[in-house]
Image (cartoon, helix red, strand yellow):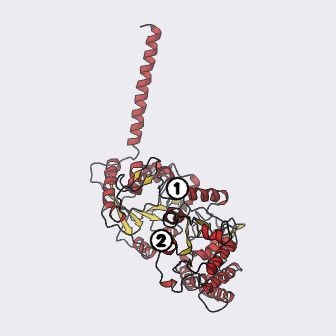
Amino acid sequence: MTMKRFISVFLVLIMVITCGACGKANSQSEDELYHNVDFSKDPTTITYLTIGDKPVNGMTEEVIDRINEILRKKVNAELDIYYVGWDDYLSHYNSILDSTEINPDLVATGTDWLDAWPNVFKGNFLPMSEEMIRTYCPQTYKNVSEKQWEICSYKGDIYFIPENEYSQWTNHGFIYRSDIAKDAGLESIDSWKELRKYVDYVVNNRPDLTVWDTDGSNTIVTLGYLMSASRYIPIYEISTYGLWGADAGEPDKIISPYYEGNDLIDFARIMKTWNEQGVWKPDFLSYSGSYKDFLEGNAALEQHHTQNYYTEIKPVMELRQPGTDAKFFWFGKESGNLLRTSILHGAMAVYSGSKNPEKALMVYDILRNDEECYRLLRYGIEGVQYEINDEGMMEMPSGYNAERDEIVTNFWWGRRDELEIRNASYAWDDYDELVQEYEEIAADYPWDGIAFDTTGIVTELQDVISVCEKYVPEITYGRYECDPKEEVEEFRRELKAAGFEIITAKLQRILDTY
């Protein structure tokens, strides 16, 4: 062997040894991701509280068993799910967190629908330091920006882990039939004026159809109109009605179109007319169809959000009513007023009474970032709950029966686009078209990270909401005898008497501190 060849062989050997050492070092780094795990003791059970009805077919338990095999190996832990049923879910959710009977570890929460901030103020969520999350939830920590951690914080402590890596559109609107719109002389519906033309056409020309198969419980349409008529940006954390907010052009001033201005009066007039026209069934308050009339071709309108439109309503309509070509008119379209979903719409918190908060963070980190765990938690067992087709999309296996095979884990508090699998049954072309439209104008939700503390105005807030529970459904469905303007004026007098202005002033003081 020549000296030159000897040196070449020697260098190759050095490189092989070095690469092997690097591989070993990387493996060690992966193994030591979670420090100080004691495998000599029995596995720690971590209870995850979520919203949803508890499954009874036994399939979810099979999935959790597989997840627990991974968790025991990685961090010597096991997962248990505690379900808060959908019936009166918010009341039950809060009473569980206020008591000490359940003591969950990981708590599903959201600032805009699950009273996340009120539970912070009541001491139900554990205040966490950045160092704690970095140590025990390292994979998630590195994928949340400094600004996003600030949004999750209050007075220097972190209370939430955000769902910041998942694209979701929960904005509402009306789903309509393109075939009927074309008969009405409309290429599409892009404004409330065109929507009213569509409704008038159905009323006058399609007596075989219910215009809107509502059951009267849906009042989000009121806020939808207010956001379409102006650039109103509601604060979703205060109430489901979006009673307070700001104009996009003056974001530092708290206002309410429910309390002042003409937009609510204009809306009341429209809905009074719709009621007189018979847009909904005479006995609509006793209807319980979950948009079945629309899906069966017996209604012309349905109200829901983007997520439901492309995952269920549009695909089902394509199968049951081919040629109807259901489309989505989203609220705020004519005013260009669209908000991205808050990263705290789905968030995870650690319960203040957790006996194992560090282990809880480790478990969450694995559920969110380990692909095998993630797929099990989100989709179930491949070949049983789902299979992947040639296009890389998810389909239900042959013979799949939802009642027998479905799992329910409702992990909506840490989803990641990178690990999601597209469902082949969804209307992706329509969704992608909408998202392209959304991305051009959508603004970030501006109230993220502003902790609107209402502990000092609980009585007033309850009284105001009680007033809304009477008047907003009346206005939304035109169910009153007087003139629309008189109805709105009466509503506003009741709001004032309940303490509306006191709440407005308090919210303004809070906003002024940010």
> Pointer 1: what residue?
166
The alpha-carbon separation of the residues under discs 1 and 2 comes to 29 Å
Q: Residues within 10 Å of mark 1 (few under 14, many from 20)?
A: some
Q: Residues within 10 Å of mark 2 (few under 14, many from 20)?
A: few
SS class, disc 1: loop
Residue 477 visible, this orientation: yes
Q: Amino acid at mark 1?
A: Tyr
**Residue 462: percent from the left, percent from the top?**
53, 81
* Marking on residue 348: none
Q: Observer-nearest residue: 345 or 132?
A: 345
Q: Quadrant of the N terminus?
A: top left
Residue 134 visible, this orientation: no
Q: Is residue 26 above or below residue 191?
A: above
Q: Quadrant of the C terminus?
A: bottom right
Q: Observer-nearest residue: 356 or 110?
A: 110
Q: Is residue 95 left or right of residue 488?
A: left
**Residue 206: percent from the left, percent from the top?**
60, 78
Query: Residue shown at 69%/64% (left/top)?
Result: 336
Q: Quadrant of residue 42?
A: bottom left
SS class, disc 2: loop
Q: Is residue 170 left or right of residue 257?
A: left
Q: Nearer the viewer, mark 1 or mark 2?
A: 1
Q: Quadrant of residue 494?
A: bottom right
Q: Quadrant of residue 447?
A: bottom right
Q: Is residue 302 left or right of residue 65?
A: right
Q: Observer-nearest residue: 141 or 332?
A: 332
Q: Amino acid at mark 2?
A: Lys
**Residue 421: percent from the left, percent from the top?**
46, 52
Q: Earlier in the sequence, mark 1 or mark 2?
A: 2
> Pointer 2: what residue?
122
